[in-house]
């Protein structure tokens, strides 16, 4: 067993469990800050962590980080920037317009200070700063690969002093690549089936709509 504190509450947990499992083990009910429950893909379980003997506070995903003796953990609430980037993918033109489009929709991206705050904040260890700079240079394909494993936890956005929202820029670049590419045949067929009524969608089926 290890002793740590989560949200200021001292708890004990088996040594080989994640922060999220330790929280549940301590009798807490998870009502927020969790989505995929340990798959490491939803980015909901953002925490800041200080390890025993360390000054530095680091960001992490609670479901992917093992508990340690003396660890102090606090969950980070979901965070959204007041300014959003609004765009329509069907209005972005062809790839000749890519540079202009990125600078119009994400003008702040070219103000990157190369401070690496986003890199340090990323719990997935992505080269976020590089992805931003590649996008600004118009290297869409390379930029989109940088964000391949992004889980949209928003920690890089939280860390960025220039309000660049690197993950949203990455998502936009990936969408651009998708819109410039040949659509997947299976998806085209399925959409055709839905449009023709061959496949029906019951929007009132249990679980089809998010709870209000
Ligand atoms: S790039 Fe940003 S949003 Fe994506 S995983 Fe890293 S910190 Fe989270
Ligand atoms: S945190 Fe913002 S300004 Fe700093 S390197 Fe990342 S994108 Fe650039
Ligand atoms: S619960 Fe989904 S990434 Fe941790």
Image (cartoon, helix red, strand yellow):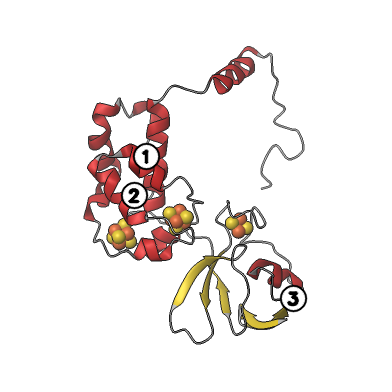
Upstream in sequence: badge 3 or badge 2? 3
Q: Secondary structure at mark 1?
A: helix
* 7 lies left or right of 125: right
Q: Which residue is mark 3?
A: 26
Is label 1 in contact with label 2 (beta carbons under 8 Å)?
A: yes
* 51 lies left or right of 66: left
Upstream in sequence: badge 1 or badge 2? 2
Q: Secondary structure at mark 2?
A: helix
In the displayed structure, 60 sits above or below 177; it is below
In the displayed structure, 182 sits above or below 81; it is above
How many numbered badges does the structure rendering display? 3
In the displayed structure, 210 sits above or below 36; it is above
Residue placed at 63% from the left, 15% from the top?
Answer: 193
Residue depth check, mark 1 versus mark 2: number of the one nearer the observer: 2
Quarter of the image with the N terminus in it: bottom right
In the displayed structure, 188 sits above or below 171; it is above
Q: Is residue 163 visible?
A: no
Residue placed at 39% from the left, 42% from the top?
Answer: 144
Answer yes or no: disc 2 within 8 Å of ligand 1: yes
- Within the displayed image, which quadrant is ligand 1 positioned in? bottom left
Residue placed at 66% from the left, 67% from the top?
Answer: 20
Q: Which residue is mark 1?
A: 173
Q: Is residue 209 visible?
A: yes
Residue placed at 37% from the left, 55% from the top?
Answer: 127
- Tell me the distance, in whole angstroms, between the alpha carbons under discs 1 and 2: 10 Å
Q: Which residue is mark 2?
A: 131
Q: Secondary structure at mark 3?
A: loop
Task: For label 1, count other residues whose C-alpha is less than 10 Å away and answer few (under 14), some (14-19) or many (20+).
Answer: many
């Amino acid at each position: 067993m290890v002793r740590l504190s989560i949200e200021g509450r001292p708890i004990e947990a088996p040594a080989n469990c994640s922060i999220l499992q330790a929280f549940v083990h301590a009798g807490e009910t998870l009502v927020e800050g969790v989505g995929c429950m340990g798959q490491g893909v939803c980015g909901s379980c953002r925490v800041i962590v200080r390890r025993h003997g360390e000054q530095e506070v680091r960001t992490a995903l609670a479901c992917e980080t093992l508990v340690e003796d003396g660890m102090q953990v606090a969950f980070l609430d979901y965070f959204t920037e007041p300014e959003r980037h609004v765009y329509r993918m069907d209005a972005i033109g062809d790839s000749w317009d890519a540079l202009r489009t990125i600078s119009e929709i994400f003008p702040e991206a070219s103000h990157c200070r190369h401070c690496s705050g986003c890199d340090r904040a990323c719990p997935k260890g992505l080269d976020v700063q590089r992805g931003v700079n590649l996008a600004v240079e118009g290297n869409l394909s390379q930029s989109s690969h940088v964000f391949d494993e992004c889980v949209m936890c928003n920690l890089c956005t939280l860390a960025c002093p220039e309000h660049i929202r690197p993950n949203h820029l990455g998502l936009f670049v990936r969408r651009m690549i998708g819109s410039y590419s040949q659509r997947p045949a299976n998806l085209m067929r399925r959409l055709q089936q839905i449009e023709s009524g061959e496949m029906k969608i019951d929007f009132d089926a249990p679980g089809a709509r998010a709870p209000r």
